[in-house]
Amino acid sequence: MRRDNRWLAHSRMVFVGVLALFTSVAAMAHPHGWIDINVRIITDDEGRATGLHQTWQMDPFYSLVVFDELNRVEGATLDEGLDQLGGEIRNNLASQGYFTHVRVDGVPQPLGEVSEYTAMQRDGRLTFIFILPLADTPSLGGRTLEYQVYDPTYYLEVVHAAEDEKPLDDALVLRGMPECELAVLPADPDPERVLAASRLDVDESGEPGLGRYFAETGQVVCP
């Protein structure tokens, strides 16, 4: 099978900030695309958090471009291209901590390496699903787990799946521990940072870690 590296380049565009993909879009301010996410907190029989099952759906424009490129690859099916693309996405995210930051009672949690992942077409959108292990498997009893998922450059906005600006029921899920309270807390960025982001052109970068100021927070509070 002959491999065409064009679609590999497209995956890098999203996850390491190569900007050519969105330059045809009229909008000039950051962000220039978005990802809708659903997160399921994985626990074991002892009530310890072992990982985050994440589903990312890329915005329709980016998805359309990627599918078009994959369909043009000679000698490969779309599914084969998506399989290869999933590995490329995983590798790019690994170097950036999978865009994910987890705290338990305010203490940052070390993350493991992603070995379970897949890329697929779902509802016409490029969808990347993976399990991000928590290295220390913290107990949730009497504790608060919080996480944020964001592109540090804020080139892409990462938000929980929502309808009418309200998170969907499956945007954040924890099964087997019904006593825990779940919430998706909206971002509350300083107006000066909002203004600074609005002034960034497609080929400009903001301050390091700009994306964290615009990140939603998933919160799990267990008694």
Image: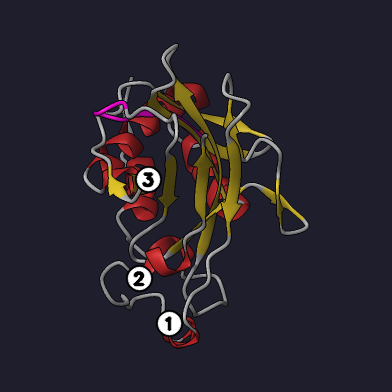
Q: Residues within 10 Å of mark 2 (few under 14, many from 20)?
A: many
User: How many angstroms separate mark 3 from mark 2 (CA)?
Assistant: 22 Å
Q: Secondary structure at mark 2?
A: helix
Read off the residue under disc 3. Answer: 11
User: How many angstroms separate mark 1 from mark 2 (CA)?
Assistant: 8 Å
Residue sitting at x 34%, y 66%: 153
Q: Residues within 10 Å of mark 3 (few under 14, many from 20)?
A: many
Would residue 133 be counted in the magenta stretch?
yes
User: How many angstroms separate mark 1 from mark 3 (CA)?
Assistant: 28 Å
Read off the residue under disc 2. Answer: 210
Read off the residue under disc 1. Answer: 193
Side of 204 where 39 appears, left or right: right
Residue sitting at x 32%, y 61%: 18
Is the Cβ of the residue at disc 1 closer than 8 Å to that at disc 2? yes
Mark 1 or mark 3, earlier in chain: 3
- Kind of residue at disc 3: Ser
- Total number of numbered discs in the rendering: 3
Q: Secondary structure at mark 3?
A: helix
Quarter of the image with the N terminus is top left
Q: Nearer the viewer, residue 41 or 57?
A: 41
Q: Choose mark 3 or mark 2, whichever is in front.
A: 2
- Range drawn in magenta: 128-137
